[in-house]
Amino acid sequence: MILAVVGGKGGVGKSTVALNLGAELDAVVVDADLGMADLPNARAPDLHDVLAGRADPVEAVQGVGGVHLLPCGRTLAGARASDVTDLASAVEAVAAEYGTVVVDCPAGMAADVGVPLLVAEACVLVTTPRPFALADAVRTRELARELDCGLVAAVLNRVVGDPPTERVRRALGAPVVSIPDDDRVARAQRHGRPVRSLVGEKDGLPAQFATVAEEVRCCR
């Protein structure tokens, strides 16, 4: 299965959700944000090398922070050398080898978002409770629908207080899981690790990411 994690607005915590879903689903996480990679990058080769024809996608998968990851480089030269049209075949090759792939997509509505949505069987949409972020989420939802990529769940991230869960569910037409604004999430991301590696199994945070993963499993 290939799952795209998308978000219309940058800074909503999309990469955090992708990393934690990779851990919950025992999947390979592909950092497909070619210009603004945010997931750990332990060593070469990376996705820039793959899309420039210098590396095999399966051989570029690394074990980082307890998660299988195909990282992306951080250089402008690497991004310029990458052929985004090869992204679909690279992701499919990893999926054929490992079974499940979670693609951390770029923010926005550009072509490099459309490629993962085209190859993915389903997507998870990440947003925050702020009105401008929700408006972008609705537009991303429409792009996914146009590309025939089903939305299996929405993550309402960085929630403080009572989340507008029902309003978001009606707007996006998918189950909504709320993730609180919690320093432990940010700390785990800084260390390049899923939340469940830093907190107890009975803590609510891993359970919330597990709920999103269960929505994904139900759509298989």
Image (cartoon, rainbow, N blue to C red):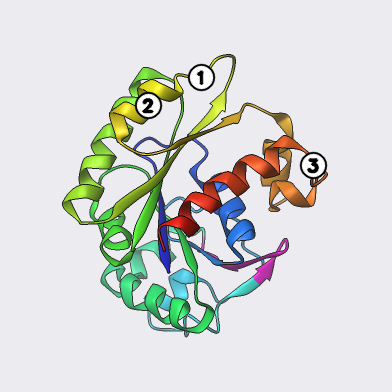
Q: Real-space Cα distance between discs 3 and 2?
A: 27 Å
Kind of residue sitting beneath label 1 = Pro
Residue contact between numbered discs 3 and 2, judged by CB atoms under 8 Å:
no
Kind of residue sitting beneath label 2 = Val
- Residue carrying label 3: 202
On screen, residue 117 versus residue 103, left or right, reads left
Residue contact between numbered discs 3 and 1, judged by CB atoms under 8 Å:
no
The total of numbered circles placed on residues is 3
- Residue carrying label 1: 163
- Residue carrying label 2: 168
Front residue of 95 and 112: 95
Front residue of 87 and 157: 157
Q: Residues within 10 Å of mark 1 (few under 14, many from 20)?
A: some
Q: x and y percent of residue 132 in the render?
A: 34, 22
Q: x and y percent of residue 199 in the render?
A: 81, 43
Q: Which residue in the rendered view is the most extreme toward the top?
A: 161
Of the 4 image quadrants, the one containing the C terminus is bottom left
Q: x and y percent of residue 138 in the render?
A: 27, 33
On screen, residue 56 versus residue 88, left or right, reads right
